[in-house]
Every structure is written in structure tokens, then in C-alpha cells.
Image (cartoon, grey):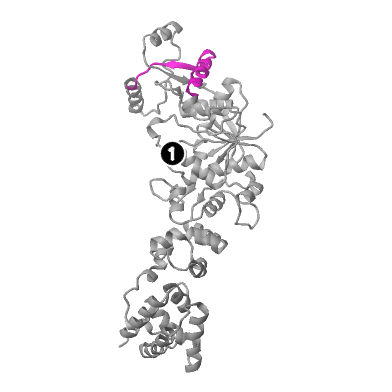
Amino acid sequence: MANTVRTRFAPSPTGFMHLGNLRSALYTYLYARKHGGKFILRIEDTDVKRYVEGAVDVIYNTLNAIGMHWDEGPDIGGEFGPYVQSERKDMYLPYAKQLVEAGKAYYCFCTEEELNERRSAAEAEGKHWKYDKHCMNLPKEEIERRIAAGEPYVIRQNVPLSGEAGFDDVLYGHIAVDCADLDDMILIKADGMPTYNFANVIDDHTMGITHVMRGNEYLASTPKYNLLYEAFGWEKPTYIHMTPIMRDAQHKLSKRDGDAYFEDYLNKGYLKEAIVNYVALLGWNPGDEREFFTLKELEEAFDVTGMSKSPAIFDPAKLTWMNAEYVRRLTPEQFTEYAKPYYEQAGIGHMNTEILAKILQPRTEIFTQIPEVVGFLRELPEYDAELFTNKKSKTNPEVAAHVLDLAIPALEELICWDETNVHDTLLGIAEKEGLKNGTMLWPVRIAMAGQQVTPGGAIEIALLLGKDEALARLKAGRAKLG
């Protein structure tokens, strides 16, 4: 096991998948795959107050949808389970007691009131307060008596009063802090549950995790983690701390500000492949000019030497651009599958999907744009006669009236309403009357669409509307021209 890379993604089930969590999972997964190792999923659910019902399923569904399949985890088991922290709760206290026996931890009976009183006194003197080891030297008999009496207690880490606590990070190099500046953090809470930091160390060690990849907000607490590894005499994992994803130079991408969840962007009509591709590039560079990667290509290309120490700025416009490129690369059939819910939403689900794909796919950046773009197909917008004026097509209301007088009866005579017949009829009239194609087609399109900018031209719109609706709109347009 020692020679096998083992990484873990250990989310808390507190809601939807934040983009920062998604990137942590992705880099952790990619590192394991690149090195032929194991990717472990662990659910850290000991914070009961933040637990959200159904959030574990969100984690499963998100990772599976992307293709980040784990080698060990709660649902598939493994040699080092259980993989849900609450199911491991009985294992933490014995480890804490082992530290107490070694003098590396101690029982603390201080109440919240006592702690607040001492903290306030220190602050009144202008001192920075940290726990003062008040309970560290209690006699063993007193400790046993107070525990037997049911008195609440916590177990605290016994941080040395002097010396250095440090660690080596792959990106940041050696980081060291003075032990005098570290607090004696709680390992076991009064309810018997471990703190996040303590459970992390125990779980990582007992699961054989060799590489810990996480956000750099944990840089400050990692020296205390390492003191625990040293206290147990355990081999330390390799640390790789990632920079945050920022909304701008000053603000992190935040759940409170919205648009921070993977699910948000799926609901906005982004493709999951585009989201994952973009998130992969937030804080990592492949070292060449490539921007587009499948998950398999990321597995091959990923290397920590390409990770940045500078915060990554999340640019929605860049994500939208990338998504548009992914949309272009879909087959027409794939595009139609993604677009169908939006066709239904727009009330055009009955229309020809081949024509819709032909005109919409080159113009779609995100799928939620579709209902607004095709709204004119469902209902003709209000417009006035001046809309028929176009210098480039050399049309105005008078020219448009003449064109529609020619087009309407010719189109009415068509028995087969298809692309060839509509095309040949309209352009045949233009040729016969000595009109430019644009002069012929502009008034026809305006009358059917009621707006200047449309996906597709007059012929595609006529086919989508069908003969009856197209002719009804052409006649209404002609009536508008007087």
C-alpha cells in the first residue's frame, strides 16, 4: 500500500456541489489517475448542524455524472471503511486517549463561562488569548473522579510551548510556525464526537491516504495536524494546498453570492463537460496552448507542476465562451436532445427539430437562451411598418408591400411546403421581377418574425411555422403596410 498513491475527496453533505469543492474533487481524482493510484470518497458528516438531507446523493450524482468514479467509498465499500465519518465515531476516542497516555493531549473540564471570563481578562490587558493549559496538570485521580461523576469534558491537544511546527507543501514549500503561537485545539468535543481536524488526521492515516489535496485555507492548521502525526509516530502525507477560486481580486467565489454551485450552471444551460473543462483550468495550466480537454485527456495531462500559487479568477464570460464551443461540437442529434426541454418551454416542441438545430446550434452559447431567441416563433411580436425599412436590402414599406403582394399568392399555390419549393418560389419571383434576393427575402422574414434579428432566414422560418401560420403572418404584415 505504501507505494500506491491514495488520494481522497472528503466533502461534508451540506448542500449542492460548490465549484471550489468540484475543483478539489477533480484535482484529487486526476492526481490519483495520473499516478495509477486510488481515489477514495469519504463523507464527513459529523457536523450535524450543517447536515442537509439528500446532500450525499448530490455528491454521488455529481461525481458520477462527470465520470469521476471512486475506487472506494460508502456505496461500494473497500478495505479501509467505513467511509462515512459518523459510522467511524467509535474509533476516535481511543486514539485521543492514546495521546493522553503519551502526554500529547489532556482532559479539559473548563466551562464555556470560565473560558469566556479568562479570555475577557486577557483582552482587557491587551493580550492575545489562547487556551492557557489550565487543566493540563490535573492529577489522574481527580480526572477519573470528575469523569465518573459525569462532568462534561473535552480532550485537547498538548502543543509544545516552544519550538517549531512545520511541514512541506508541494506548491508552497516549507511552512513553519512557532509552537508558542498555536492553541491547544480540541480533539474530542464534549459530546464525544471528534473535531473536524482530529477526525481528518485519524481518517487519513487509517485509510492510508498518501497525498492530501485541499484548499489553502487549511495551511494555518496543517502544522497542528503534523504535530499529531509526530505524536503518534505516523508517516505524514504529502500536502498539496490549492489556491481559492475568486469572483474578483478581492472576493472569493461565494455560496452567499449565488452562482457558486455546479448545479446552478447546469440549470442555466451549461454543459457539464464545459464546466469541468473550465474548472480544471482555474489554477492549473497544461504547459501548452491547449484549452479543450475531455476527462480522459485531463487524466493524462494533469501535473501538479502546472498548478498555480496565485488565486484563480472565475470569469463567467470565459465559461460561456467555452460552453459555446462545446455546443458547436455536438452532433445535431445531441444538440436536439439538450435543446428539447427548452423547445417545450418556448412552446415550439412541435416544430421541425432538424431545422431548429441547423439555425440554433451555431448561435447558442447556453441552452437557456433558446426560449428568448425563438419566442417570435410561438407568438408574433408587436411591430410597426418601419421595421420593413432596410438600406442594405433596399427595402421600405412601399417595396415590402409590393414584395408581399407577389409572394403571398405564389406561396398559397404550393401543394408541398418544403425547403426546395419555398426557396424556388421566392427566389424565382425575385429573378423574374429583377429584385435582389435580399430585397425579396427581407420583407417576407420581417412579416413572419416581427423582428429584425432572427436565427435563420425567411425560408427556415417559413418551414418552421408551417404553411398556414406563415401565410397568416404574411397577410397580417401586408395589412400593416396599408
Image point (41%, 73%), residue name: 465
- Quarter of the image for the N terminus: give it: top right
Q: Position of residue 70 (x, y in %)?
A: 58, 38
Q: Which residues are magenta?
A: 88-112
Q: Position of residue 165 (x, y in %)?
A: 56, 28
Vertical side of 299 occupied by 415: above or below: below
Given the current orientation, which residue lies at the most extreme top position?
Answer: 141
- Secondary structure at badge 1 equals helix
Residue in front for this viewpoint, 33 or 361: 361
Identify residue for label 1: 55
Neighbour class for label 1 at 10 Å: few (<14), some, many (≥20)? some
Is residue 158 visible in the rendered image? The answer is: no
Residue in front for this viewpoint, 98 or 276: 276
Is residue 239 visible in the rendered image? The answer is: yes
Given the current orientation, which residue lies at the most extreme front position?
Answer: 415
Q: Is residue 270 left or right of residue 237?
A: left
Q: Is residue 92 magenta?
A: yes
Q: Position of residue 411 (x, y in %)?
A: 43, 84
Q: In terms of secondary structure, what is the magenta stretch mainly?
A: helix
Image point (48%, 89%), residue name: 430
